[in-house]
Image (tube, helix red, strand yellow):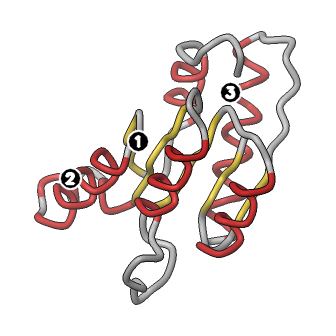
């Protein structure tokens, strides 16, 4: 799987949540996690590796750079991989932000780009545990 987030702390917390959820799911499958901290590193990894699952934060830089956001990574991944599960994430989708123009715009960007699932950050461990049981067996 590939996790894309420019925040080192957020990326590490998310990967920890994934590992805990993976263990709790009881699956015997190995979990290999690659991480990217920028648009460029994510695009390089997508071109050189095969992934079953990609998790992408929408806003990778502050201020945002046009054309270098999570939704563009999702679009490229959709073109590259047929059966990959793609999760779009954003802290703009928190309980307050969900009902703002930015929250609605972010959700629409991620979904339109091809995200199978759109989640708010931070993703609670129990949400990941529930989600991982719904992913295809190939994961």
* x and y, in percent, of residue 45 in the image: 75, 59
Q: CA distance from mark 1 to mark 2?
A: 17 Å
Q: Is residue 47 left or right of residue 58?
A: right
Q: Quadrant of residue 9?
A: bottom right
Say above or below: 92 vs 125.
Answer: below
Name the secondary structure under disc 2. helix
Total labels drawn: 3
Label 2, residues with CA under 10 Å away: few <14, some 14-19, many ≥20: some
Label drawn at residue 115: 1
Q: Residue at x 38, y 43 (%)?
A: 114
Is 48 located above or below residue 17 in the figure?
A: below
* Residue positioned 26% across, 51% down in the render: 107
Q: CA distance from mark 2 to mark 3?
A: 25 Å
**Disc 1 + disc 2, Cβ < 8 Å:** no
> Residue 52's image quarter?
top right
What residue do we see at 79% from left, 22% from top?
23
Question: Is residue 46 left or right of 126 when viewed as pictured?
Answer: right
Q: Tell which of 69 and 83 is nearer to you.
A: 83
Is residue 67 rendered to the left or right of residue 27? left
Residue 121 in the image, given as x and y percentages of width and height: 45, 52
- Which residue sits at x=77%, y=10%? 26
Classify mark 1: helix, strand or loop: loop
Q: Which mark is residue 21?
A: 3
Q: Quadrant of residue 109?
A: bottom left
Quarter of the picture holding the N terminus: top right
Q: Work out whether mark 1 precedes mark 2 in sequence or the reverse, and give the earlier one.
A: 2
Q: Earlier in the sequence, mark 1 or mark 3?
A: 3
**What residue is disc 2 on?**
98
Is tag 2's residue or tag 3's residue first in the polypeptide sequence?
A: 3
What separation in Å lies between label 1 and label 3 (alpha carbons)? Answer: 21 Å
Residue found farthest to the front: 79
């Amino acid at each position: 799987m590939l996790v894309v987030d420019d925040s080192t702390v957020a990326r590490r917390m998310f990967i920890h949540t994934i590992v805990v959820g993976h263990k709790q799911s009881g699956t015997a499958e190995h979990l290999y996690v690659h991480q990217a901290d920028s648009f460029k590193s994510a695009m390089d990894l997508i071109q050189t590796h095969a992934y079953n699952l990609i998790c992408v934060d929408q806003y990778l830089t502050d201020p945002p750079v046009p054309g270098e956001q999570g939704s563009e990574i999702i679009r490229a991944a959709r073109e590259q991989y047929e059966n990959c599960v793609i999760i779009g994430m954003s802290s703009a989708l928190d309980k307050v932000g969900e009902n703002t123009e930015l929250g609605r715009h972010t959700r629409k960007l991620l979904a339109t780009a091809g995200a199978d699932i759109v989640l708010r950050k931070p993703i609670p461990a129990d949400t990941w545990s529930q989600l991982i049981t719904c992913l295809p067996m190939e994961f």
